[in-house]
Amino acid sequence: MVANSRIILLIFMFFAGFTSISGCSQIFSNELIVNRYADALLTKNNELQFRFRINNEILEGHELYKVKVTIHDEKLAAAIGKQEIIYGEDQVLNGEYIDVKGRSEKYIFMDPIILKHDLHIHELRNMIENNHAVSIEVYNNKEVFGRVYLTNFSSEL
């Protein structure tokens, strides 16, 4: 009986270790900004759109927050025309806060931004995936809840 318990424990430990190493288990994820769902999309109209998912369960106890995208690469910032974008700033008066209530996950698709200067697709990919050109921050007036560099790039071209 003790041997069976040990075998079951070993199998469970192997499964738990495998899922956490491989990233296959969303159940055990405690990321505020789920990086595998965060990316910059280059549209066929030469626009850049930032998309990401916020895990609202981690923000329990905090009802409101803002999302800020910061462009760290000077060349990319010049092409976009901004170094900082606050989600909801244009849609809601004074960049009001986003409400946490509701679903446990919130997908945010920012409005596409027309690039003022053409950048080669490989250059954009390298900036975003390798050079930490873009970061996403979730915060309110009191504290920063999470910050992550955007490391995924996709294109419609």
Image (cartoon, rainbow, N blue to C red):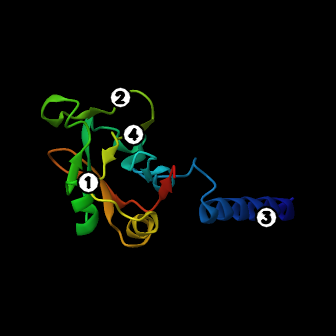
Please tell me which residue lies in front, 34 or 61: 34
Marks 4 and 1, the one that precedes in the sequence: 4
What is the spatial separation of the Cα atoms under label 3 and label 4, in whole angstroms? 47 Å
Marks 1 and 2, the one that precedes in the sequence: 2
**Residue 57 seen in the current view:** yes
Whole-percent x and y of residue 12? 72, 58
- Above or below 60: residue 124: below
Q: Residues within 10 Å of mark 2 (few under 14, many from 20)?
A: some
What is the spatial separation of the Cα atoms under label 1 and label 2, in whole angstroms? 37 Å
Give the residue type at disc 1: Lys
Residue hosting label 4:
109
Residue hosting label 3:
6
Q: Is residue 91 left or right of residue 18?
A: left
What is the spatial separation of the Cα atoms under label 4 and label 2, in whole angstroms? 18 Å
Give the residue type at disc 3: Arg
Label 3 vs label 2, nearer the camera: 2
Secondary-structure class at tag 3: helix
The answer to whether mark 3 and mark 4 are in CB contact below 8 A is no
